[in-house]
Amino acid sequence: MTKKQKKLLTKIIVSGILFVGGFIVPYEWVSLLLFVAAYLTVGYSVIIKAVKNIRQGQVFDENFLMLVATLGAFALREYSEAVAVMLFYQVGELFESIAVGRSRKSVSELINIVPEYANIMVDGELTQVMPEEVEVGDIIIVRTGEKIAIDGIIVSGQTVIESSALTGESVPTEAAVGDEVLSGCINLGSTIEIRTTKEFEDSTASKIMYLVEEASSRKAKTESFITKFARKYTPCVVIAAAVIALVPSIITGDWATWVSRALLFLVVSCPCALVISVPLTFFCSIGRASASGILIKGSNFLELAAKAEVAVFDKTGTLTEGRFEVAEIKTYGVAENELKYYLALAESYVDHPIARCIAQLSNEGKDHDEVTDVKQLPGFGVSAVINGKTLLAGNEALMERNNIEYVKSESELTVVYAAVDGQFVGYVTVADRVKDRAEKAIFRLRKNGIKKTVMLTGDKEKIGRYVADKTGIDEFYAELLPDQKVERLCEIRQNGQSVIFVGDGLNDAPVLTEADIGIAMGALGSDAAIEAADIVIMDDDIEKVALTVEISRKTLRIVRQNIIFALGIKFAIMLLGIFGFANMWMAVFADVGVSVIAILNALRCGGR
Ligand code: ADP
Ligand code: MG
């Protein structure tokens, strides 16, 4: 319990004793005195808050409702009821505050990836400093069990690193001198020294933390609806209560009955069950997702994902591993080494899964030969000028576009053709593997309301068909250029269905932005992907796309349950109250009890 909560608990106990005293003492005025004391002990803070809010022009809030209701009860000489309403209201508040506090804590623990300190050497001694003080290029020391504070490259030591706080997966990886390590990861092995490559603020952990903090400011529609609803609803309720108090009283002359019914109405109507539980549900879900390495940039995306009907996937790196291996090399009129040399040199400048594989074909010339005019041709390949000769490397379309006479490969695999100064010199075929979990992911998506799955690829028709068959994807479109992928997506969106696009964020950022919900996979360490996407999956586990949809649907389900439950109970007791069938105790349940139940329900979103 926090200090504040302890203080509230003390107040409740003191007030409770005074309250019981008020019942026991036989003298009426002493009893009244005790009730007033009990009331003030526990209601003082509510009165202050209500007065403060009225001064600021916010008249109609829950504090105001409680104040009017209890003062009214006093006026009707229902002293014990007045105290009880305030007392139980505060018991409810205490309960809420503990529940909210607990979930906040679990969320912040889950995303507690930002290190509090970094170790540096000062005059030969290990010193702890604030991570903000470390500059780019400084050496930080990370001992066993410590969190890496800043992104950097290992300059000494060899260790095992766990990135579960970022990715949700606890598979440790080995790291040695020269390897890049990210902040937020934990050093499980021996002490390492890292040369930082970024400022603390630009490091992975800080960036992710910032995103999570920002997330709650992007409200879901339901969330902002509830806020607006509460703002309009409270004045309406107050007016309704006034009408209930005045009109029948004037007609029947029975003021006591109708004023007390109006007060009861006011107590029931308090909207806090919704105002607190709805945002809390979204909050817990975002926390739950980040514990699995899924960053959701705002509650609005949770809501959209829950309603999505179509899921569109990029192929390479999303449905497939994106780790290509060379299968065959065929040359025409040049030595194999020469072909490898040209291809590797050009591709070493490109950030593409195919390029990463081909760049490893040869190490010759990487340091001394001249490479200029490297152009990545999205959807086609790459062109570069190497020692004055123009190299083109890419697919059939690239060869055809440049009017190069080439020998078409019969291979089922992805083929990279090469031409030097307009002369075809050979090709390399590369193979990628469909992700093991892709089929399961598609299956789970379908179970969770996704009606159609589509794959977009720049690769050949044959490969597209193979991957679509293997994963169970409904439709696929092959041989698309990046801008044609955007066009396809727009066409799919035109049916009015809400569309998720899942890609790697490398060359599909425009598509990510165009979709209703853009999900980037394998984004750990890729700033571009994290920027472009609405939802970021840190590792490349494709089943997490399904998990994302599952979490979002559960969130919306709980939100709906709470809205229906809270409004239902309140409405029922309001009606009973107007016709005289409810008492103050039922009203207190409809207010505080309902809030507590709604909050407990919201907390279900936090669990795995
Ligand atoms: P995907 O849609 O599968 O992610 P891309 O749009 O990235 O594929 O690329 C489409 C095609 O363009 C690839 O299948 C390949 O044939 C060719 N290509 C793209 N980039 C390169 C490159 N750097 N080197 C060789 N070929 C490339
Ligand atoms: Mg791609």
Image: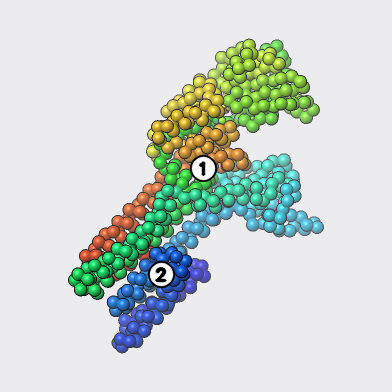
- The quarter holding residue 408 reads top right
Q: Secondary structure at mark 2?
A: helix
The amino acid pointed to by label 1 is: Ile
Residue at image position (58%, 32%) is 507
- The reply to whether residue 63 is in sight is yes
Whether residue 471 appears in this view of the structure is: no
Residue 313 vs residue 229, the one in the foreground: 229
Which residue occupies 56% across, 39% down?
A: 532
Label 1 Cα neighbours within 10 Å, binned few <14 / some 14-19 / many ≥20:
many
Give the side of residue 286 with respect to residue 557, left or right: right
In this picture, residue 230 sits left or right of residue 135: left
Separation of marks 1 and 2 at Cα, in angstroms? 39 Å
> According to the image, label 2 marks what residue?
90
| Residue at x 56%, y 45% (from the top left corner) | 167
Mark 1, ligand 2, within 8 Å: the answer is: no
Location of residue 589 with respect to 113 vertically, above or below: below
Which color scheme does this rendered protein use? Answer: rainbow
Disc 1, disc 2: CB below 8 Å? no
Q: Is residue 371 above or below residue 203?
A: above
Tell me the SS state at disc 1. strand
Q: How many other residues sit within 10 Å of disc 2, few (<14), some (14-19) or many (≥20)?
A: many
Question: In the rendered image, which residue does mark 1 sit on?
Answer: 535
Query: x%, y% of residue 359?
Result: 68, 27
Amino acid type, mark 2? Gln
